[in-house]
Image (cartoon, helix red, strand yellow):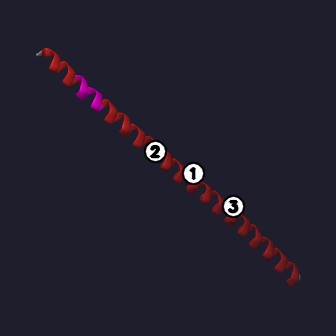
Amino acid sequence: MPALEEEHVALAAIYLDLEERSAATTAADEAMAMILRLQEEEASIEMEARQYQRIIEEKFAYDAEEMSSKKF
């Protein structure tokens, strides 16, 4: 095989490797973006759940106070 053909084969292999690495990088970037979106969504849901928990606790405290004030 002449040297020029060997060089073309080597360059084709390098180009293929570069494409594979680029695809892997893109997939990793997309996965990281999804992880960040899910973490933000989770934080938002947790904050909303804490707000509802506080509302429920306040309602229970209010109801308990109302019940004990009506006993007397």
Residue at 39% from the left image edge and 37% from the top image edge: 49
User: Which of marks 1 and 2 precedes in the sequence?
Assistant: 1
Location of residue 25 by image quarter: bottom right
Mark 1 or mark 3, whichever is nearer to me: 1
Count of numbered labels shown in the rendering? 3
Please tell me whether mark 1 sits on a helix, a strand or a loop: helix
How far apart are the two marked residues, 1 and 3, measured between alpha carbons? 16 Å
Q: Which residue position holds label 3?
A: 23
Q: Residue 51 magenta-drawn?
A: no
Q: Which residue position holds label 1?
A: 34
Q: Is residue 8 left or right of residue 21?
A: right
Residue 65 rendering spot, x and y as whole percentages: 19, 25
Residue at 36% from the left image edge and 39% from the top image edge: 50
Residue at 69% from the left image edge and 61% from the top image edge: 23
Res. 3 mark? none
Amino acid type, callout 2: Ser
Q: Is residue 26 left or right of residue 56?
A: right
